[in-house]
Image (tube, rainbow, N blue to C red):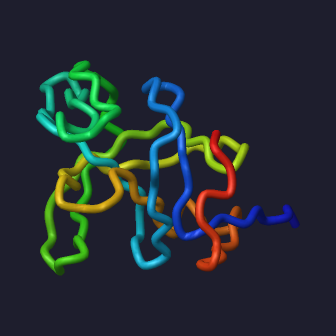
Amino acid sequence: MMEKSVVGRNEYISIPELEFYDIEAKIDTGADSCSIHCDEIYLNENGTVHFKLLDDSHPNYSQEDIVMPVHKIKKVKSSNGKSEERIFIKTAISIVGKTYMAEISLTNRKDMKYPMLIGRKFLEKRFLVDVSLKYKKKV
């Protein structure tokens, strides 16, 4: 059995394919999936999604348009109890010095403290969460 890495309740993550580095993420074992704050999310007819990471209130916002293949579209129940259809992309996430593939939903997290949420499907079989820790390692 592979040894699990320990993560804190918040970690810095990177998404190399999107040139998105050292972003604060909330580790959330109550959330099923990962999600990231995006703006201007549009589904294209050719099976791709067009979006902007973050928004102009975030220091890492670049205004760059990103186009990626849609991995899936799935109904997700948010923390406020409302269900919505979300577009998911599949890409690698780097966290505490390791890189893994992840399914990430694109959503508006503008009113949330952290722009990225790491859910339990990504965490299971890979990580143990120690809620007394924060930011173990920049990636």
Q: Is residue 95 left or right of residue 90?
A: right
Seen from the viewer's position, the closer of residues 117 and 8 is 8
In this rendering, the count of numbered labels is: 0
Residue 17 position, x and y percent, is 49, 25
Q: Is residue 104 left or right of residue 43?
A: right
> Is 102 placed left or right of 3 in the picture?
left
Give x and y (percent) for residue 91: 49, 36
At 46% from the left edge and 71% from the top edge, which residue is drawn? 28
Q: Residue at x 71, y 44 (%)?
A: 98
Q: Residue at x 88, y 66 (%)?
A: 1
Q: Residue at x 59, y 65 (%)?
A: 134
Residue 123: x percent and y percent?
A: 59, 64
Q: Position of residue 135 (x, y in %)?
A: 60, 57
Pick out the residue farthest to the top: 64
133 above or below 86?
below
Quadrant of the image occupied by residue 133: bottom right
Which residue is more in the foreground, 10 or 89? Answer: 10
Quadrant placement of the C terminus: top right
